[in-house]
Amino acid sequence: MTMTVQRTPLSADRVVALGYCPDCYATGTVALVAPGTRRCRAHLVDQRLLVETTATGQARLAAPAGGRRRPVYPTGVQTPCVACAVAGVDRQGLPRDGAGSDPLCIPCWRGRTDRQNAVERRRLVTELRERLDIDELTECAACGEPEPTPTCWLCGYSWLAEARAEHEHLLTLEAAAVATRFAQLTEMDEARERVSTMAAWIERLTETLTAFHAGDSWGRPVWLLADLLARDAATRSSRRGRRSALGMVCGVLAVNADRRSGRRAMPGRAGTAELAGCDNTRPVTDAWRRAEALGWCVRVEQGRRLTYAERCATGRSQARAVFDITPLHHGDPAAQAAQIPAALDVLADLLDHARTLLAAAQERVDALDARAGGWVDYREQVRRQQMRRAVAAARDHARDQATNFRTPHTVSQAMSVYSSLFRGLPISPPITSIPSVDDRQSRRKDGASRSSTRAAVDRGCARPLSVQRPRPAQRHGDASRPRRARPEWSGWAYALARAVQDRWVWLRHTPLPRVAATLGATLGPDWTAEALDAWVRRSRSRPVLTTPDSPVAYLRAVLEDALTGPAAPPYPARRHAEHRRALVAAQAAEQHERHTLAHADEDDRDRVATRPGGRSPAVEAALAAVRARTSGRLRRADRAALDVPAAECEWPAVAQPGAGLAPGL
């Protein structure tokens, strides 16, 4: 119950005697108090500030519920809500029904209005029933009882239905609350995971810049990015136009790759757009295409949508594109060194943008924790501040390096001033060959000296220092080694290897050059991935393994088993041709060996057997011994003595002329 403010102010005791709160009366509002009390509920709360200790050991000031008052502004209506003041809630209101009416806040005013509307609707319904002479049933039509009973099939059923509906409503509310809580936890976990991802990216950028400053190999992404900028600058015909996103996108690609080899870079299209500060993924696609056209990187795996089995195994729906960056020795070292400042500026910009993304992610985590009733620990705040300072220092140092970096330049021989002035020479002497007094070779034109450096020979200014071991020969004038010719399968084996990796899952994590070399040394240019898969399944009785220990060795064994059988493959294969040639060579060697053995057996039989009408082997041996120790004249006599008589011959007797007819004629 509330009252309007009187024109003549009353004393506090008079207000208390009337049963109202003197504090509310002083502010312009009259509120009833409970019996036995002198203040309303809003002013009975202890107004003193309390000191409490948090769970982390911090002390802070805490005001009790209802003790805080709103500030009094010099303008506007400063009238507390009557209904809220009775309940002990400090909330401002307005006189909704004109001057002199009860000041109410929006919730109290809406509640009062809704109640009045409900009363008015009930009154109108009652009047309508009276006009239409409709009697309202006050008892059950089945059992006749005014109250529902469980034994009645009509009113008992309606009572159970009402209870069941109320129970289902409670279950729905509980499920909605659980779903809301799970959604809140999921959102918080995603926000924290994003903070961890951005912190890891900042740490990788910082380590790259620090390693480059220290001269470590982990700073190679700076040189890789400088190589890209050098290639791009060499192909540009004009410097006009706005700044391209090529440097930022390829900077993300270079830092994401392996820091020592520059391979297996897979930052993802959407992730690269976010880390490079692009509004969408179109600049990322254009930058990747530009980098491939410049020959700075090669796409070894194409991004695609995974199948259902792959999504179940990996837990993601998309496969990222994989790039291998071209090694540094394929570029121009002088051009790369000239682009080092620009590369450092790009990495500094990436680090600054990553710090902004990390700050936004941390603010989101703090907001979610505050909504859930938590707070940020003091140690976490200190760690964040230290990280911000470290990132700012790394960024400033990178920009200082970019400003103060000077590209190396070559000078002619004997132009070192610092090594000549202290010797008293205006110019340092050339490093040439100086013959020794004892005609020994000291320095050759094509390499370092192999002679002892301890000989007491005065070599002047070009005298070398003593060393522990001789240096190897250095042939500066010789021509460079010719580059090894590319294998003949390099034109078609890589495309076949990519298709085979897409079809056989167990080969996807194997380096592409190894798979291409294995297929190129075994198959031919007419083969396809579908034909290879069909031929392997048809020619082998055992199925192909899904997770072999050594994929390349297992691929070599599978091809060996499939291409060395009796059946001919559908397309010409190098391994099958070699197998056929080996079989033919083995058959020819076996046949030649059989012929050799047969000829040897025939020779042995001819040598052992006695020829008809000729000499026996014993006689031939004796004649050979006689020839060796006697002259030709004596040899004829010995041969006549050693001649075999005709009776010993196996030939039949031959009829002589004049001997008549043969017997039996």
Image: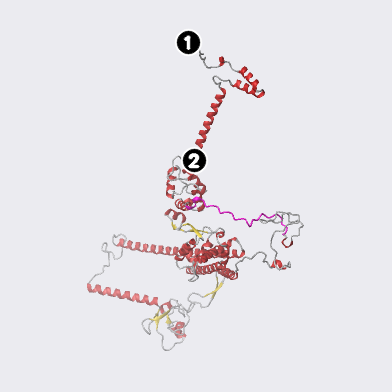
Q: Nearer the viewer, residue 332 or 63?
A: 332
Q: Using the numbered discs, state the Cα–Cα distance from disc 2 to disc 1 in whole angstroms.
A: 66 Å
In the image, what residue occupies the spot 53% across and 26% down? 602
Question: Residue 120 location, x and y as percent?
Answer: 30, 76
In the image, what residue occupies the spot 44% across and 88% down? 9
Q: Nearer the viewer, residue 657 or 665?
A: 657
Query: Which residue position holds label 1?
Result: 663
Question: Residue 270 location, x and y as percent?
Answer: 46, 63
Q: Nearer the viewer, residue 445 or 146?
A: 445
Position of 256 with respect to 83 (left or right) is: right
Residue that lies at the very extreme toward the right in this rendered image? 456
Observer-side mark, 2 or 1, equals 1
Q: Amino acid at mark 2?
A: Arg
Question: Residue 494 location, x and y as percent?
Answer: 48, 53
Query: Which residue position holds label 2?
Result: 581
Question: Residue 438 location, x and y as percent?
Answer: 76, 54
The span shown in magenta is 464-491
Q: Earlier in the sequence, mark 2 or mark 1?
A: 2
